[in-house]
Image (cartoon, helix red, strand yellow):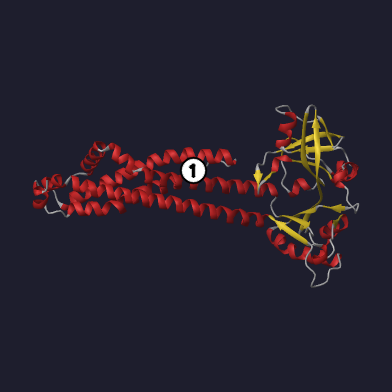
Amino acid sequence: MTPAAYLVEAVTSLRLNALRSALTAIGVIIGTTGIIVLGAASSGANKMIERQIAAYGTNALAVEAIKVENAIQRGPAVVLTDEDAAAIFEQIPGIRRMSREIVGNVTLVAGNARMTSQYRGVDASYAGIADLKTSEGRFFDEDEVLSGARVTVLGAGVAAKLFGSNSPIDQTLRMGGVPVRVIGVRTRLGSFLGYDMDSFIYVPVTMARSRLPQGSGAITNQLSAIELKAASEASRRAAKDTILALLRERKHMSGDARNRFDVFDSTQFVELMNTTHSTLSSLLAATAAISLIAGGAGIMNIMLVSVTERTREIGLRRAIGARRRDILVQFLTEAVLLCVAAGIAGLALGTAGAWCVAKSSGWPLIIAPQTITLALAAAAGTGIVFGYLPAHRAATLNPIDALRRE
């Protein structure tokens, strides 16, 4: 028999038992759907991580004071100041940019719209550290920081909530009762580690310190963090321990005293996201594999039943000259064809599922060609592995015994 003849026989057999074939293929459909959704989620999540790490800033570092919850056990609290920021910038090799940062919450009012947002009081150099880009307007400059100008750059989400579809540029809003002019809107970033990156606003650090009550602390030059930009990846790696050593020296911390500071960089975010993503991917892959195995077992069972039902047909084919190889290939073709059809159905469902996941998570929808190839190959492989035993049993039936069976 020719390959086309095998295919025609397989299609005819499956069509005559369409309902049974469809029910048998459900497991393979679910498994294939899982592979497509998994692959799309993996690609979309990786792309989103790349975008968000880029938004955080290449070779960026953030120095923060560790919150002291039990001062008796952990010692007195220490703070970051303007002088610490200047010392790090001047004394640590490889640091190209530095920005002070003050963080607080403030109520925003624009016309009849009202919301609470987190502001970040930063220097003009922050735009270069975080690779900050604006969809409208611009970021504030050094002169505006020195003068404490009442200007702000809004996150995309804040701009949408306060001004809707209208441009907020050169509009005035009130921050905690202080009138502030909008000069820019940051490009939309999405969520990162559970934070809505589009819900922040940015103001000059001097304006935050002098105009916003949340920006003032017990120490007038106290900072929430110090943002840094290293000249290279090697400089960034080398700077972390050096910064901690410098701060311990400046705060007169003894050798056995616990660090009161930490230095964060983008690689920590990457490691955290990759760990979470790897765990999720493993769970999804296990689910898809179990579904394929269950589907394959169902197909093998149905094919064994089919061999029993078609024993006389097999005997007749052998009697008129069909070889064992012909019987083997015929039944194997049916199993593979059923699994491939299930794989195509799973591909359609998986694409729809991947779209839903991407839509709800804010990820880009990416279904790589290799993911489609893997899904269809897994489906076909399931047909070959689980269809071989029934096909082999059919091929090895004794023709005389097969003709005698009712």
At horizontal 30% and vertical 41% (from top left) the residue drawn is 21
Using the rendered view, name the quadrant where residue 77 is placed: bottom right
Q: Say left or right for 18 vs 313.
A: right
Residue 109 in the image, given as x and y percentages of width and height: 81, 32
Quadrant (top left, top right, bottom left, bottom right) of the N terminus: top left
At horizontal 15% and vertical 47% (from top left) the residue drawn is 311
Q: Say left or right for 320 vs 59.
A: left
User: Is residue 101 something that shows in the picture?
Assistant: yes
Q: Identify the residue under disc 1.
A: 367
Residue 219 in the image, given as x and y percentages of width and height: 90, 54
Q: Say left or right for 53 vs 140.
A: left
Residue 153 in the image, given as x and y percentages of width and height: 78, 38
At horizontal 50% and vertical 41% (from top left) the residue drawn is 354
Reply above or below: 243 against 285: below
Q: Say left or right for 317 vs 381.
A: left
What amino acid is at disc 1? Ile
Asked whether 127 or 336 is in front, the reply is 336
* Dot 1 crowding, Cα within 10 Å, few <14, some 14–19, many 20+: many
Reply above or below: 91 against 20: below
Reply above or below: 343 against 325: above
Residue 70 in the image, given as x and y percentages of width and height: 80, 62
Asked whether 326 or 397 is in front, the reply is 397
